[in-house]
Image: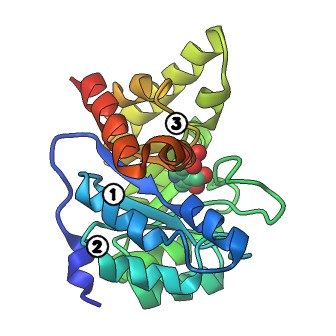
Amino acid sequence: MDNLLNRAPLRPNSLRLGVNIDHVATIRNARGGEHPDPVRAAQIVAAVGGDGITAHLREDRRHIRDEDIARIQAATNLPLNFEMAATDEMLDFALRHRPHAACIVPERREERTTEGGLDAAGQHNRLAPIIARLTDAGIRVSLFIAPEMRQLDAAIRLGAPVVEFHTGEYAHATGDQCAIELKRLYDMAALAVRNGIEPHAGHGLTYDNVQAVAAIPHIAELNIGHYLIGEAVFVGLEAAVRRMRELMDAARG
Ligand code: PXP
């Protein structure tokens, strides 16, 4: 595998779309065979102008399997954003596979998905050496955190080059709360940029709610999974990614 392929320059001056392909593997694993193959999904994302692939190797391997990671890296030249828990096992795995980026996420076995942000503030001593090892290996570290001052402050102290803001609270908000959550994302993204951190965002984004987040000018990348894979069941992955891209580009103006 040519790791240089995974270091392809990202699209400048626009909002990047990373597609999380975990749930293609969820469907595959429901029958224990090889179909549908997340690698094919990665290739389709690359062909329709997605900017990156996101994949989460969970401790319980409920969707992405170990061998998928190398297969995805070999099959496309898109940057791979490897989602990982802050464990020794995942650190070793990341160091062996050298993805373009490693996004450190909280992980609880019983959760259905990554339900909240990482407690970067409470886990400084656990995270600092992991971030150092990944950074020394040339892997761009991102911390998946809630859009909160305390967590952003911790990310700054940890020297993370990227934070991904968990948009779950925004995605689930209704009425006035929606504007409050959006303002929180805006303010934290602006503050991240002022502190030299590149802000990304993701979780629970759909055709209906993506544009308000995409319009936040400081945000460099959105990572979207479940909705796109669900929509792909009806219209195909190609059409689903294209539509999401159009909405993001229109919002960014
Ligand atoms: N970004 C990160 C770090 C995630 O863990 C996930 C999945 O929870 C996503 C983005 C995509 O979220 P969703 O599948 O809800 O679009």
Q: Residue 1 carries which label?
A: none
State the residue position of label 3: 205
Whether 181 is drawn above or below 154: the answer is: above
Q: In which quarter of the image is residue 241?
A: top left
Q: Which element is circle 2 on? A: loop
Whether 61 is drawn above or below 1: the answer is: above
Task: Measuring from the top left, give residue 134's x and y in whole percent.
Answer: 44, 78
Whether 78 is drawn above or below 189: the answer is: below
In depth, the one of 133 and 28 nearer the eye is 28
CA–CA distance in space, label 1 to label 2: 9 Å
Task: Measuring from the top left, give residue 84's x and y in whole percent.
Answer: 57, 70
Seen in the image, is 51 located left or right of residue 90?
Answer: left
Does the beta carbon at disc 3 come under 8 Å from ligand 1? yes
Q: Is mark 3 in CB contact (under 8 Å) with mark 2?
A: no
Q: Tell me which residue sits at (17%, 63%) in the image.
A: 9
Q: Residue 45 carries which label?
A: 1
- Local packing at callout 3 (Cα closer than 10 Å; few below 14, some 14-19, many 20+) is many
